[in-house]
Amino acid sequence: MRFEELENRLLLFAGQFCSVEFSSPDVLMGPLTTERTSVLASPSARDESHSFYGPLQSDRRSLLVESITPAAPEVLPTLVINESEVILARFQALRSRGIGVAPLEPPESAGDAELGPALGPYPNTETFKLHSKPGSNYTIYLDFDGHVTEGTTWNQPNQDNMPTIVHPAYDRGGTPGVFSQLEHDLIQAAWQRVAEDFAPFDVNVTTEDPGVEALRKDDTGTDTQWGVRVVMTTDTWASCGCGGFAYLGSFEDATDEPSFVFNNSLDGVSETISHEVGHQLNLGHDGVGASTYYAGHGGTGPTSWGAIMGGPFSQEITQWDHGEYFNASNPTEDDLAVITTTNGFGYRADDFGDIIGTAGSFNIAGGASVSAFGIIEQNTDVDYFRFETGTGNVSFSLTPHSDRPDLDIWAGIYNSTGTLLNESNPSNSTSASFTNVALAAGTYYLKIDGVGTHGAYNAVTDTVDDPTTNVPWKQSSPTGYSDYGSLGQYAISGTIVVPSSNQFSVAALSADKREGNTGTTNFTFTVTRSGNTLAAGNVDYRVVPTRQKTPSANVEFTVDGSDFVGGTLPDSTVSFLAGQVSKTLTISVVGDTDFERDEEFAVILENLQSGWGFSDSRATGLVQGDESQAHVMDGVQFRWRQQNFNKGNFDHFAIDNVSVSNTTFTDDFDPAIDNSQWDSIVGASATNTFGGSGNGLFFNGSSIRTATTIPLDVQAGDQFERPNRHQRHGVRR
């Protein structure tokens, strides 16, 4: 931390937390105040919750900083105040806003022994295309490839007085911007951990640049999309001696106001990202006693616990909290309430029913294998799944995210009347399981709840309740945690007994197609039945957006109701005549000219008639996006279209609608072609132009394509390609 006396002002460069000690108890007769808290006059008064940010005022006289005493990262540094030279009635802190600072990761976290998985879970081509909730209006962008900060609070003259701050890329190998296999692995694993922390909320955690407009909330009052950038970098400008920092409450800023993360091990970078975003979402620190950062408790096992807004680098389960642990320094702050009520977004919509009457369905394959993915979004949420089984043994495995989960799972098997038959809640595990549970043929339900370490089932209320006396995490040697922050993702896999030889099944027939620009495109599926087909029968179906199959998987872009005829997700019945064994199910997709990714959807069979079961209850379709946008340089974009995509010499393109953001420049090459002639790009050559004014451009090429637009030049070496389902831009470098 650096302090300077300049123009009779106290300049706090790093914005760190600090305590105040007075050389004489008589120096300050009244309280020293900041915008958020007061520090009472005493030999060792402290501000335990927030860094000082001005103005700092004295009721009677001013203060002169004599020295600063260094301190360990987990202890507040000390300002020593001397009464000998009173020169002002006010000292102005450099920062005009609150800054939340993250602690440095402990030395053992930075070593090569803690660098995460041997291989990343995804191909390297997906490292910078990861999404946790694509389609959300709210974004947390994890920026690992370097950034230039301009026009923000960080750059203002009364702040760091640096109009341009260049941040090198995240680096573990000594070559910023060149990502090794290890760095790809670390980035992917860090994204997974952060995605788990924010899984309960309606926000997309992504490593793909969404553009500045998705990261700022304009002042018009009509903006519907905003978020924050988190820059993983090296501290080349602030010399803060910390693990990262962010402006408090900057999620809704009108500028792209980034936070910064300087810790770079897997534990350090992942925990610090969520910590700094927490500050941007208006959260303060979780400390213990006089220490700013609580390191957590519970040893080193799978239920060792830490608060995200503390410093939980060595803990296995990290959660948002309510200051419930022993001697918490911030016991009144309700993290979940602050996150979901002060930033424009709330919780995700509930994915499965909370009662047996609205229970969800498993995906069934081969008649006996079942699976599902879900999220416990709130600590009042439970999820039910219905299943039919024949007489025999059933088994289920329920697992949260495998690396630093937020969710601790309780599970129960219920009969058709809602009576609990079996429960699973291991004391030293966040998973649950049932092995070879004997059941009679019939209908049953599986219930999932997010619980604390010491929760016990209450048969009267059918709930899992935390203890109310001798609470383990409130003791002087705390252990465990409550159900408050036990939220997050889970996966279910298991086996049942095929309930009947009479079975329904669904499979894709012609369900991987381009959307089209007008009218409708029919996607077809085959629904079959086997067994006793002499009588008429029916089975219900519904179309649903697809979801990942495992926690913190990269999430595909998916459909919503507007993609289908009628504006809602299709939901109906397939009816069979006596003796009929196969029906074609047609799902009509509405064409449009919107820029969209490839979007998946699923057809789910459900609500069986008595005496029937499922062989395969789920099939998927893919709506191919056939409009693309390309970004060729910062702030420049245009519309382009491709026909006959096969990476051959007869791929044809058209370019139109060029614009440059933050300027008045726009150029619609040929308004006459929009949109009636936009589909007519067939058989064109490089010299062809649009009809009408002739200002559009056609061109064709082989697998690598370059072109010159009018009046903007595409830079040499740029490649044009049709975006895949994770790719936002059609031009790459």
Image (cartoon, rainbow, N blue to C red):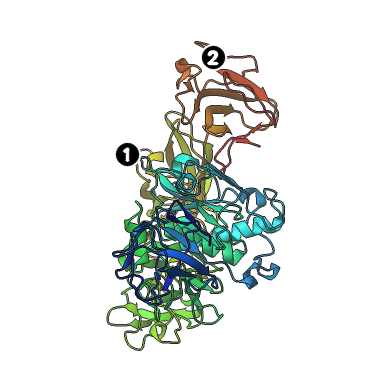
On screen, residue 136 versus residue 191, left or right, reads left
The answer to which image quadrant residue 708 occupies is top right
Residue at 70% in and 26% down: 649
The answer to which image quadrant residue 340 occupies is bottom left
- Residue at the extreme top: 693
> Number of numbered discs present?
2
Q: Quadrant of the C terminus?
A: top right
Q: Mark 2 — residue?
A: 695
Q: CA distance from mark 1 to mark 2?
A: 34 Å
Q: Position of residue 181 (x, y in %)?
A: 71, 56
Residue at 56% in and 66% down: 104
Q: Position of residue 534 (x, y in %)?
A: 42, 56
Q: Position of residue 372 (x, y in %)?
A: 48, 63
Q: Nearer the viewer, residue 105 or 714?
A: 105
| Residue type, mark 2 in image | Asn
Label 2 element class: loop
Q: Are marks 1 and 2 in contact (CB under 8 Å)?
A: no
Q: Is residue 30 visible in the rendered structure shown here?
A: yes
User: Label 2: how many residues lie within 10 Å, few (<14), some (14-19) or many (20+)?
Assistant: some
Q: Mark 1 — residue?
A: 222
| Residue type, mark 1 in image | Thr
Residue at 58% in and 67% down: 267
Question: Mark 1 against mark 2, which lies toward the viewer?
Answer: 1
Label 1 element class: loop
